[in-house]
Image: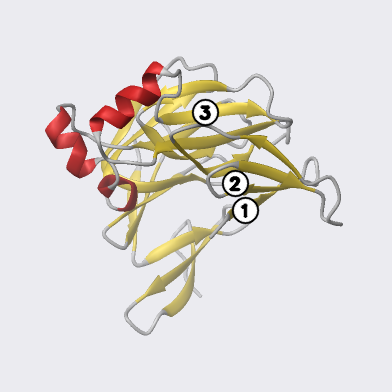
Amino acid sequence: IKHMDWSSANGKILFSSGVLETINPDGSDFIMIVRKEGGYCLHATWSPDGKQILYAFLPSSLMDEDIAEMVAKGSKPGLYVTNADGSSDRLLIENGVNGSWSPDGKQIVYQTITRKTSPEERKTELYRNIFYTSDIYIINIDGTGKRLIVEWGQNPRWSPDGKWIMYHVMGETYLISPDGKEKCQINGYGIWSQDGKSILSRTGHISQLSIKKVDGGEK
């Protein structure tokens, strides 16, 4: 299944399913812009101005010897940034996945691939934490200013207004301010509204939906 992102700035649609591809909405100009050996390009998103792409590069195997071979070839697992045409592709941060742009395009919030450092621990936790929980960091787009904001969280997403970062833990939704000083819980699994003022939340086994205002109101 391809991950897709449609840029409101440049109008192009971005696909990431192992490689990165872009296409115009009318079906023209379909091109592959990034492909890497030994792994997959995934979770790609446009920058707010449509000039850059953030994506995760993950190894095709859990084996440390395969990861070492990738590193020897110059391809390290982590978050990468590339221009819209695939040029100037660069590693932003190792051990990162599920990145989200700040609305001004100056920072990225992301979760780590694994919290473990030994080879034996990485073999079991490299992929597991992508789908469960790991640590969440903020980093500047130039690679500076890395700082931890959440221990144990998943799938961080910046609010459209930049005031909050949403993340999930075991099916529950939490909000934290980018400076880490404010935090609250939203029941269920939530997604942002386009203006960042409300959250659509799904709760229960029967998938009951509710719209909750960030200031505490509910519909």
Label 3 residue SS: strand
Q: CA distance from mark 3 to mark 2?
A: 22 Å
Q: CA distance from mark 2 to mark 1?
A: 18 Å
Q: Residue at x 35, y 67 (%)?
A: 188
Instruction: Work out whether residue 21 or residue 38 is closer to the camera in this orientation and state it.
Output: 38
User: Who's the residue at 39% across and 64% down the image?
Assistant: 189
User: Circle 3 sits on which residue?
Assistant: 80
Residue 100 at x, y = what percent? 51, 40
Amino acid at the residue labelled 3? Tyr
Give above or below for 67 relative to 127: above
Q: Residue at x 25, y 36 (%)?
A: 63
Numbered badge on residue 4: 1
Q: Which residue is mark 2?
A: 160
Q: Residues within 10 Å of mark 1 (few under 14, many from 20)?
A: some
The answer to whether the residues at label 2 and label 1 have Cβ atoms under 8 Å apart is no
Q: CA distance from mark 1 to mark 3?
A: 17 Å
Label 2 neighbourhood size at 10 Å, few (<14), some (14-19), many (20+)?
A: some
Q: How is the image coloured?
A: secondary structure
> Residue 120 at what x, y percent from top left?
12, 34
Q: Given the image, on which type of amino acid does mark 2 rest? A: Pro
Q: Are marks 3 and 2 in contact (CB under 8 Å)?
A: no
The kind of secondary structure element at disc 1 is strand
Foreground: 175 or 172?
172
Q: Residue 83, located in which quarter of the rendered image?
A: top right
Q: Residue at x 65, y 19 (%)?
A: 88
Residue 110 in picture, x, y percent from top left: 42, 36
Question: Quick check: 87 above or below 12?
Answer: above
First along the sequence among labels 1 and 3: 1
214 left or right, relative to 176: right
